[in-house]
Amino acid sequence: MDDSKIVIIPTYNEIENIEKITRKVFSLEGDYHILVIDDGSPDGTADAVKALQKEFPDRLFMIERSGKLGLGTAYITGFKWALEHGYEFIFEMDADFSHAPKDLKRLHKACVDGADLAIGSRYCDGVSVVNWPIGRIIMSYYASVYVRKVLSMNVYDCTAGFKCYRRAVLEKIDLDKIEMKGYGFQIEMKYTTMKLGFAIAEVPIIFINRKEGVSKMSSGIFGEAFWGVLKLRFRTITPRQETTEVKQ
């Protein structure tokens, strides 16, 4: 069985974290690869990745983009690259250690055991968030409640950004039709996965707010998600028809 794994990490000004997160992922058993999608970080994040590539030339890859183009477009760029390069398990993870690298193994196991999409969930086993202001916890938790009700999704953490996809899921989704760019992207991808009939599993994790660097969260992100969910409710989801070609 193909067990190739790629962790996609979008970055913007993550100079404090990028080397540490890279080394931590590479210290895990299982031969994880990393693809960094850097949106023109002025703090030297891309230069730090280039220096690390000399040490890990066959495991660390990077796509540089010219500016802040949105979380969703970063992941879609990464998904297409991962599919073109033949990876079987494709992960999303933040650079700031809010997602514990060791939990990559648990997400991978959930997919090996039968899930098509495994979600690192903050809310499937109570509320497992550390060092967030109470207002942000309430906003995040009830955002997921809202999404579950409107979209009839049996997922507790609808906005989670720590995930593992089997390649079959991303091959079937028409990535060019994904509309939301911010954190609503996470909702749209989960909903599309569900509507296409794939199996989704939630894996309980502890989410720890970043210790270094600056959060990219904004009120506009939540506004896009709120209205985007209403539009999603009435959209027809159809699978992508073309077969993805794999580069040898």
Image (tube, helix red, strand yellow):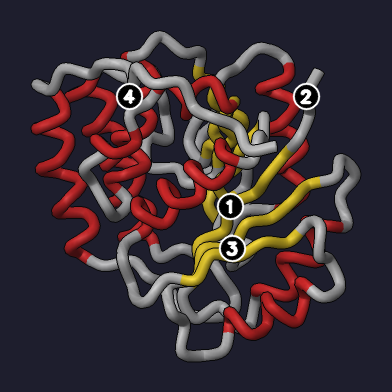
Among the two numbered marks 1 and 2 on one chain, the one whose residue lies closer to the N terminus: 2
Q: Nearer the viewer, residue 211 or 38?
A: 38
For marks 4 and 2, give the one nearer the viewer: 2
Could you tell me the amino acid type at mark 2?
A: Asp
Marks 1/4: CA distance? Answer: 20 Å
Circle 1: residue type: Ile
Q: Which mark is residue 2?
A: 2
Task: Say above or below: 158 vs 62.
Answer: above
The location of residue 111, given as percent across then percent down, is 66, 22
Whichever of labels 2 and 3 marks the residue nearer the N terminus, that label is 2
Neighbourhood count class around disc 1 (C-alpha, 10 Å): few under 14, some 14–19, many 20 upward: many
**Residue at point 53%, 65% (across, down):** 63
Left or right: where 58 falls relative to 84: right
Q: Is residue 149 left or right of residue 40?
A: left
Identify the element where label 4 is drawn. helix
**Near-viewer residue (94 or 98):** 94
Residue on which the image places disc 4: 192
State yes or no: discs 4 and 3 in contact (Cβ < 8 Å): no
* Amino acid type, mark 3: Val
Q: Position of residue 65 (x, y in %)?
A: 42, 71
| Residue at x-position 66% and y-position 73% | 18
* Towards the viewer: 85 or 192: 85
Q: Residue at x 77, y 75 (%)?
A: 52
Asked which secondary structure carries label 2, the reply is loop
Question: For the point 65% across and 75% down, which residue is it?
Answer: 17
Q: CA distance from mark 1 to mark 2?
A: 18 Å
Q: Residue furthest top?
A: 197
Q: Which residue is under mark 3?
A: 36
Give neighbour class at mark 3: few <14, some 14-19, many 20+ (Cα, 10 Å): many
| Sequence-first tag of 4 and 2 | 2
